[in-house]
Structure formats: C-alpha cells, structure tokens
Image (spheres, rainbow, N blue to C red):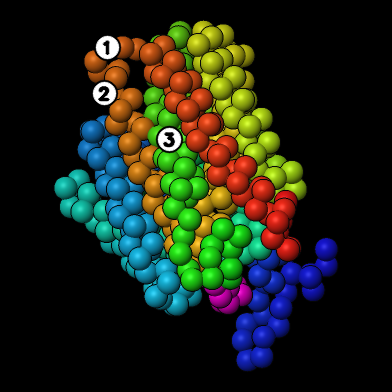
C-alpha cells in the first residue's frame, strides 16, 4: 500500500486520510482513546494518587470510579447527540475540555474536589468516546477499525503502566496528568486529517432510520456481560495470584507481559476483519476464553497463571473488537455504536463492585472463577445469535463484507 492509497486531497482543506484506510483507523483510534485513556492506565493512576498525594486506597479508587461513571454518562449523552451535532467541532471542543481539566487537576490535592473534577472529565471523555465510536461505525469495516482501536489502547496502556509508576516518585502526580494532556494534544493535532464520515446505510438499518431492536439488544447484553465479567477478574487479578501463593513481583511481571501479548487479539481482527464472518471467530475465541478462565484455578503454578493472563488478554481484545463492530451495524448514524460504548463502560464499572461484594462475603476466588465460567457460557450464546444474523445478512446485501 502506497502513501497515496491512504491520503485524499480536498480543495482548500488539509490532506485527509482516506476514510477506510488503515491510517484513518489509527487516527480514529487515537481520537477514541483520548477520551478514556485514563482507564488504560488506571492502575498507574490509583497507585500514583496513593503514593504521590498520600491518599488512601479507597479515596484513590473513588476518584478512578468517578472518572468511569462520568464516562458512562458522557457516552449516554453521545447516543442522543450523535445524529444532531457535527462530530469534528464536537470532538475538538471535547479534547480542549479534557486538556483544561487535566491542567486544573495537576494543582488539586483535596480528594473530595478531585472526585468532582474527574467526574466532569469523565463526562467529557465519555462524550468524546461516544462520538468517536459513532464515526467509526460509519467506516466500511468497523470491526477492523475497532481492532485498531483496541491495539492502540492495549499498546499505549501497557507502556503507561510500565513508565508512569516510575515517574510519580520523581515528578509527583503531575506526571499522570501531563501524560493525559500530551495524549489529548496529539489526538487534537490528528483531527484535521480525518475525512468527513457522513452517515452511511448499514446492513440491518432500514431506510427509515429505525433500528432492529432484538439483535441490537442481544449484542448490547453480550457487551455488558463480557466487560463486567472480565473486569471483575482483572480488578482482583493481583490478589488472586497472591492468594494462590505467588510472589507479588512475579504477579506484576506476568501482568505486564500479558498486556503486551494481548495485542495479538485486536491484531488478528485487524488482519482478518470479517473475512470469515463473525460467528465462527467468536465461537472459537470464546472457547479459548473459557479455557483461560478455567486455567486460573491452577494459579499456584507460575506457568498456568501467566498463560491464563495472556490467553484471556488476547481473547478480551479480539471479542470486544467484534462486539463493538456488531453494535455499529444497526443504524446509519452511529447511535448504536455509541450505545455499545455506554453499555461497555457500565459493565466495566459494575464487574469490580460485584466481585468485591463476593469476596467481602467470604466466598473466595474459586467462587468468582466458577461464576465467571457460567456467565461466559451465557454470554457466548447471546453474542452468537446476532453474529449469525449479521453474517447471513452480509451474504444477501450487495457489497456486504465478510
């Protein structure tokens, strides 16, 4: 592929990346990641707030939760606004708002005030993510673009988790917010080089703009369950390893390695897209998810713990790329993609809460793992129903992608 394949020249405008090129996918991925990058480096942020501002674990966790719940509210707003606003000016305004709030956050030491400020940051960030998802839904192959998005998030998130904990003791919590500011500035610089992305017809969207609610409902429910179960495990994955007798140093190393290995998941979606449909890739990958989750029962073995983390990391990124791509297929404006983003965030916020209650009640990690296996089976059945329907529809629609 030559550079001319990726660039379109518009009169009196910036040269823009061709709407459905890999370069455009990368630019869109940075835009979407900017609104939620703090989630990818959440472990570093919580640790930095504790070590840099001497906050308690609970206070730091509440600040992180405020950011996520704010993002869910912002994503909900995006569902309503995506058809009514021009996405480019809205994205620019949101990025400027994120930068301003991160600058203010650098000088706040009161956790109560920081909770309110980060809640506002989350709302604006969630709105930006919802807008970005809506734009991605207008590409020819949103599954592949969401694969690029998750590749960017996993890669940069892993880098942030590796570097930021080392910078906070030297530069204080300002290092955390500077990282977020720099990422938003980079994303802001990329916006002018994106194409227009007007709404386009989707295979399961009607000409009247109505949405097929049944397959969409199945897809959104699958997103919620998948994210909730995965985050319930991830939030306590360090404690799980330690409870099985592993050293803290090994657990941290294993998680760091797993973050990078997990890039294989979205990378595969980028390569194969929907060439083989959605049903069979999801069926096979969810089988691997079940195997990896079951392997956590053997976490007393270092090899088993590492393999389980790597395996579930790979499948997490791959499944979510397909599910978000599926959600984008049910209307022409991008509302359902924004809805997928909202439901995803609710799942991410809900999973750790439920897992925490289970552990507090004394049921232990075996109970959580067994519950996760059951819910993953249910989730598999739910997601395969709309996946098969989309595959069948793609064969019938001229130009449908498979």
Which dot, 2 or 3, sits closer to the camera? 3
Q: Which residue is mark 1?
A: 362
Reply above or below: 59 against 156: above
Q: Which residue is mark 3?
A: 225
Q: Residues within 10 Å of mark 3 (few under 14, many from 20)?
A: many
Q: Residue 228's spot in the image, x, y percent?
A: 40, 34
Give the spatial CA distance, label 2 vs label 3. 17 Å
Is residue 356 part of the magenta span, yes or no?
Answer: no
The residue tagged with tag 2: helix, strand or loop?
helix
The tag on residue 357 is: 2
Q: Residues within 10 Å of mark 1 (few under 14, many from 20)?
A: few
Give the spatial CA distance, label 3 vs label 1. 23 Å
The tag on residue 143 is: none
Is 244 or 367 nearer to us in this picture? Answer: 367
Q: Residue 105 sits in which quadrant?
A: bottom left
Residue at 34%, 51% (x, y): give it.
Answer: 72
Residue at 29%, 31% (x, y): give it.
Answer: 353
Span of residues in magenta: 190-199
- The secondary structure making up most of the magenta span is loop
Q: Residues within 10 Å of mark 2 (few under 14, many from 20)?
A: few
Is 68 or 376 nearer to us in this picture? Answer: 376
Q: Residue 322's spot in the image, x, y percent?
A: 59, 45
């Amino acid at each position: 592929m030559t550079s001319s394949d990726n660039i379109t020249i518009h009169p009196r405008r910036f040269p823009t990346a061709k709407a459905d090129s890999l370069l455009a996918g990368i630019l869109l991925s940075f835009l979407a990641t900017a609104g939620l990058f703090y989630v990818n480096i959440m472990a570093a942020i919580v640790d930095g707030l504790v070590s840099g501002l001497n906050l308690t674990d609970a206070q730091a966790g509440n600040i992180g939760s405020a950011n996520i719940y704010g993002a869910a509210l912002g994503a909900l707003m995006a569902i309503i606004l995506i058809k009514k606003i021009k996405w480019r000016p809205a994205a620019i305004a949101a990025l400027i708002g994120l930068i301003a709030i991160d600058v203010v956050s650098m000088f706040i030491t009161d956790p109560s005030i920081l909770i309110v400020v980060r809640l506002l940051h989350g709302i604006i960030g969630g709105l930006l993510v919802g807008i970005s998802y809506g734009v991605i839904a207008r590409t020819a192959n949103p599954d592949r673009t969401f694969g690029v998005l998750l590749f960017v998030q996993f890669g940069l998130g892993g880098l942030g988790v590796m570097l930021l904990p080392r910078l906070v003791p030297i530069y204080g919590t300002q290092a955390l917010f500077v990282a977020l500011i720099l990422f938003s500035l980079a994303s802001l610089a990329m916006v002018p080089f994106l194409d227009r992305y007007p709404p386009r017809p989707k295979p399961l969207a009607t000409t009247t703009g109505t949405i097929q609610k049944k397959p969409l409902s199945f897809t959104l429910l699958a997103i919620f369950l998948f994210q909730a179960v995965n985050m319930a495990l991830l939030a306590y994955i360090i404690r799980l390893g330690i409870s099985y007798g592993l050293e803290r140093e090994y657990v941290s190393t294993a998680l760091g390695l797993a973050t990078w290995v997990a890039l294989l998941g979205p990378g595969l979606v980028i390569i194969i897209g929907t060439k083989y449909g959605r049903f069979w890739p999801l069926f096979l990958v969810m089988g691997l998810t079940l195997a990896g989750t079951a392997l956590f029962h053997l976490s007393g073995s270092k090899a088993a713990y590492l393999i389980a983390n790597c395996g579930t990391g790979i499948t997490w990124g791959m499944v979510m790329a397909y599910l978000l791509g599926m959600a984008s297929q049910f209307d022409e404006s991008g509302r359902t993609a924004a809805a997928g983003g909202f439901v995803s965030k609710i799942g991410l916020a809900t999973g750790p809460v439920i897992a925490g209650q289970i552990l507090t009640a004394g049921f232990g990690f075996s109970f959580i793992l067994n519950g996760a296996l059951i819910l993953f089976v249910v989730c598999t059945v739910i997601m395969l129903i709309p996946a098969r329907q989309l595959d069948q529809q793609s064969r019938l629609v001229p130009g449908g992608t498979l």
